[in-house]
Amino acid sequence: MGLKAMKRGVLITIAIIVLVYLAICVAMFLLQRSLLYFPQPRRVRAPESTMVLPVDGAELVVTVRPLDGAKAIIYFGGNGEDVSQNLDVFSRAFPDHALFLLHYRGYGGSTGKPTEQAIHGDAAALYEKVRSRHPDVAVIGRSLGSGVAVRLASRYPVARLILVTPYDSILGVATAAYPLVPVRLLLRDRYESGKYAPDIETPTTIIAAEYDEVIPRASTEKLLSRFRNGMATMQVIGGVGHNDLGANGEYLEAVQGALR
């Protein structure tokens, strides 16, 4: 093989690699929301446990346990969670709180498509409706929902904030997961909790899983460091990972303790 042929072969190989890389980047940009959101159907469908909340461009389903009184809990779940499955456990664990479990757009019968901007707006709409009935509103956010909860608590008064397996930002998590992809240039839904944490004036409890395989501990600890001194504490539940944390009795005890 001559020198020119070798150079041509090298250039062709480089061009193929570049094209494949660009194709991967384009695919990730176009499909990124399908990689972030995993809508789930709703198992609890009883009419008395369902509220429909009209919002701009959609109708949201909220799984509820109505209860008179001052106290309420708003729950924002993970990206692949059917929040209605928490209703029975939460009803027994928090007998003096009305419960409002939000199904994001596209989840559990809610219409529309999930995006960060839409979900933050929906969370605010739900909060305002709940607060009009219950002046003492606690907010729980798990995994993806922790970012929704943090931003909400930075803008509105909440009684308590509980963050389960939270992150400093989805941008940071995605950058660590895809180090060879220019995530900072491609990512649209960033959920930058760390940017809003310094504005929170609510006592905050962070609950982490010892063996969290989804959210790096460094990201959770970075979020903790963003809060004002003394505003947030962290509890690590031993022996569990990201997805089985909820089945551990210590998890529910930690949430109950945070609400006392």
Image (cartoon, helix red, strand yellow):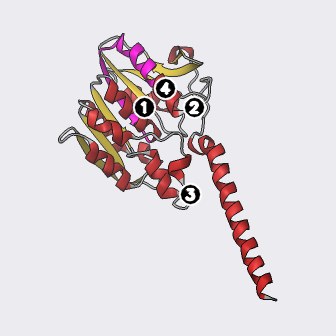
Q: Which mark is residue 114?
A: 2
Question: Looking at the image, is mark 1 or mark 2 nearer the viewer?
Answer: 2
In the picture, residue 127 is in which quadrant? top left
Quick check: 14 above or below 69?
Answer: below
Q: Earlier in the sequence, mark 1 or mark 2?
A: 1
Are the residues flagged by discs 4 and 1 in contact, CB closer than 8 Å? no
Are the residues flagged by discs 3 and 2 in contact, CB closer than 8 Å? no
Q: Amino acid at mark 3?
A: Val
Q: Which residue is mark 4?
A: 102
Q: Which residue is mark 3?
A: 181
Q: Amino acid at mark 4?
A: Leu
Are the residues flagged by discs 3 and 4 in contact, CB closer than 8 Å? no
On screen, residue 32 versus residue 141, left or right, reads right
Question: Looking at the image, is mark 3 or mark 4 nearer the viewer?
Answer: 3
Percent position of residue 124, x then y? 42, 21
Q: CA distance from mark 1 to mark 2?
A: 26 Å
Q: Amino acid at mark 1?
A: Val
Q: Which residues are magenta?
A: 123-143
Question: Looking at the image, is mark 3 or mark 2 nearer the viewer?
Answer: 3
Q: CA distance from mark 4 to mark 2?
A: 12 Å
Residue at 33% in and 25% down: 155
Q: Is residue 40 visible?
A: yes
On screen, residue 185 versus residue 125, left or right, reads right
On screen, residue 29 versus residue 20, left or right, reads left
